[in-house]
């Protein structure tokens, strides 16, 4: 199984409530995915500054003094804001790649959750309610966000097996389903020099999309070609800096419901996830068609 | 009328109350408020009662229904009226995938659209969809009637047995062994009756009939054990 929720706000007045609305939607999807949960949230644009969200299993020792060490290594001001096992490093946009490389040298135990101007990804093992509470997701504001509750089928229940997966700067992917050709595709991508960390099927899909875009595809084109190259069941929701997209495999066994009002576009694996949204009773509610790529942008 | 607040009192209490109704019950009219997309609402009923669900439902609403009338005043999630035996299920909005799957009898009316696999493996149920149906509808349909007043998606009636399919609009593609068939007077009669019972003013003459060509492996007696 697995549950997906997504919320794209058209009404700026709702932005302070984005985290609270997404948390409520996420918790409703607990029985579709009680193993782990994650959230990708698109917050304020940092005016030339970018965010690198990291995770450590020993956050207190790993994050202590890290901002200063990294600042010295990349010769630029860095701030660090810790949230439980995660921390958001803020730095000038041009320094992201350098910072990534420097972090590997500083501490190999640091895992990169996301990079981008506005995107932050938080994910951990545990019940969605607990995961959301650990990161105070309900207090976050933003323009749009995606959440995922995981019931593992293809690989172990670990932080790195949880969704969302970062597919590029300010881009992320969540998945409900299971891919059957992920082993052969992983081998192919590794031969192409793509780094894939886990045995997880969705990470392969995320790496595939990143690889396609590195070779000149737009995100839309990468999703279109995923319909040819990925074998298995999937409903994907992808986040971009200014919106989100949805694509389902041609069989479309994995459920998906969308709702749209003047205030928002919302996605849920089930209608249950949407019932507390404002104006849902008069919203346009529909199921996205199979093998069709949808996008909503600001 | 009995009013049941699903959010306050819970699914188990609802379904056990509905199951407790005997054939001669006086509590024949029920209203369920705050369904909020919950699963398995009014499943396994077996009494001549009417249940009105005031909102949208999640998975498997009105599954295994016998005798009862279940009216959803909203949309229905996957597997609505799955394995229905008799009675009437009406959905005012849309129905998600595999509506009426494996149903043995009764009538399922969907006033909006139904998505993929509507009537998959139907075994005698009648289904009338006022709008469109998605891909793989009536897959391996064995018996009963599927009426689609709008359009049908890909692979309609794939590997169909003896069910009758009536479509007014376009059919994106027919599945394996499914063909268009002659609409004879007896089919128009069946269709007229179903449309009337489903509250649909479409004319039977505007529909085309589809069914099995009976050419697949299992129809050839030489392949019998």
Image (cartoon, coloured by chain):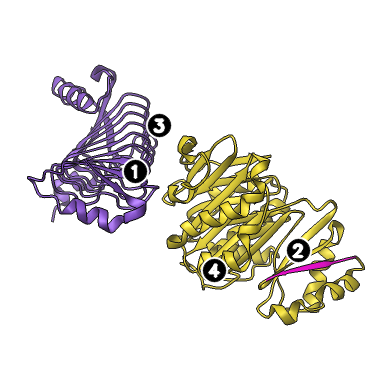
Q: Please report contact status of discs 2 and 4: CB closer than 8 Å, yes or no.
A: no
Q: Colour of chain A?
A: yellow
Given this view, does label 2 or label 3 mark the residue nearer the observer? 2
Give me the C-alpha separation between circle 1 and circle 2: 44 Å
Give me the C-alpha separation between circle 3 and circle 4: 47 Å
Task: Please count the marks in the image.
Answer: 4
Given this view, does label 4 or label 1 mark the residue nearer the observer? 4
Q: In this rendering, is residue A203 above or below B110?
A: below
Q: Colour of chain B?
A: purple
Which disc, if any, is residue A52? 2
Residue at point 56%, 50% (across, down): A6
For the residues beneath circles 3 and 1, the answer to whether they share a chain is yes
Which disc, if any, is residue B117? 1
Q: Chain of mark 2?
A: A
Magenta residue span: A77-83
**Badge 4 density bin: few <14, some 14–19, many ≥20, Cα 10 Å:** some
Give me the C-alpha separation between circle 3 and circle 1: 14 Å
Q: Is residue A164 visible?
A: no
Q: Chain of mark 1?
A: B
Question: Element under label 4?
Answer: helix
Residue at point 59%, 71% (across, down): A159
Given this view, does label 3 or label 1 mark the residue nearer the observer? 1
**A52 inside magenta stretch:** no
Given this view, does label 2 or label 4 mark the residue nearer the observer? 4
Q: Nearer the viewer, residue A108 or A120?
A: A120
Residue at point 20%, 51% (across, down): B18
Question: Element under label 1?
Answer: loop
Q: Nearer the viewer, residue A89 or B78?
A: A89
Give me the C-alpha separation between circle 2 and circle 4: 23 Å
Label located before the other in sequence (2 or 4): 2
Across and down, in percent, residue A186 comes to 59, 65
């Amino acid at each position: 199984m697995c549950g997906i929720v997504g919320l794209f706000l058209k009404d700026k007045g709702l932005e302070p409530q984005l985290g609270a609305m997404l948390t409520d939607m996420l918790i409703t999807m607990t029985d579709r995915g009680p193993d782990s949960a994650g959230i990708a949230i698109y917050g304020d644009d940092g005016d030339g500054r970018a965010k690198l969200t990291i995770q450590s299993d020993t956050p207190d020792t790993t994050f202590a003094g890290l901002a200063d060490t990294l600042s010295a290594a990349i010769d630029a001001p860095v701030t660090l804001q810790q949230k439980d096992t995660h921390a958001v490093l803020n730095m000038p946009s041009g320094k992201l790649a350098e910072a990534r490389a420097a972090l590997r040298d500083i501490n190999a135990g640091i895992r990169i959750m996301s990079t981008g101007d506005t995107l932050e990804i938080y994910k951990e093992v545990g019940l969605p309610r607990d995961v959301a509470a650990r990161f105070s997701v309900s207090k976050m504001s933003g323009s749009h966000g995606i959440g995922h509750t995981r019931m593992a089928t293809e690989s172990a229940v670990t932080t790195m097996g949880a969704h969302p997966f970062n597919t590029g700067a300010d881009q992320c992917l969540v998945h409900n389903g299971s891919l059957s050709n992920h082993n052969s595709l992983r081998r192919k991508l590794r031969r192409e020099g793509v780094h894939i960390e886990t045995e997880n099927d969705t990470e392969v899909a995320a790496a595939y999309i990143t690889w396609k875009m590195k070779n000149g595809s737009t995100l839309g084109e990468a999703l279109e070609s995923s319909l040819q190259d990925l074998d298995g069941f999937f409903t994907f929701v992808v986040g971009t800096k200014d919106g989100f997209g949805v694509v389902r495999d041609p069989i479309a066994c994995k459920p998906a419901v969308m709702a749209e009002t003047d205030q928002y576009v919302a996605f849920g694996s089930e209608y249950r996830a949407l019932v507390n949204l404002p104006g849902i009773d008069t919203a346009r509610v529909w199921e996205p068609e199979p093998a069709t790529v949808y996008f909503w942008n600001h | 009328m009995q009013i049941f607040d699903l959010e306050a009192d819970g699914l188990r209490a609802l379904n056990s109350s509905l199951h407790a109704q005997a054939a001669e019950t006086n509590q024949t009219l029920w209203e369920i408020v705050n369904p909020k997309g919950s699963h398995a609402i009014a499943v396994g009923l077996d009494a001549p009662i009417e249940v009105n669900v005031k909102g949208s439902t999640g998975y498997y609403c009105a599954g295994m229904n016998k005798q009862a009338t279940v009216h959803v005043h909203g949309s229905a999630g996957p597997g609505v009226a799955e394995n229905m035996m008799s009675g009437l299920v009406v959905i005012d909005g849309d129905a998600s995938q595999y509506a009426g799957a494996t149903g043995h009898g009764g009538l399922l009316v969907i006033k909006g659209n139904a998505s993929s696999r509507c009537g998959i493996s139907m075994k005698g149920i009648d289904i009338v969809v006022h709008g469109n149906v998605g891909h793989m509808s009536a897959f391996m349909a064995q018996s009963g009637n599927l009426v689609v007043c709008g359009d049908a998606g890909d692979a309609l009636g794939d590997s169909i047995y003896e069910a009758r399919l009536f479509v007014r609009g376009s059919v994106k593609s027919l599945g394996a062994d499914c063909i268009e068939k002659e609409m004879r007077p007896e089919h128009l009669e069946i269709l007229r009756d179903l449309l009337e019972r489903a509250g649909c003013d479409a004319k039977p003459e505007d529909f085309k009939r589809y069914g099995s060509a009976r050419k697949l492996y299992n129809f050839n007696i030489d392949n019998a054990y």
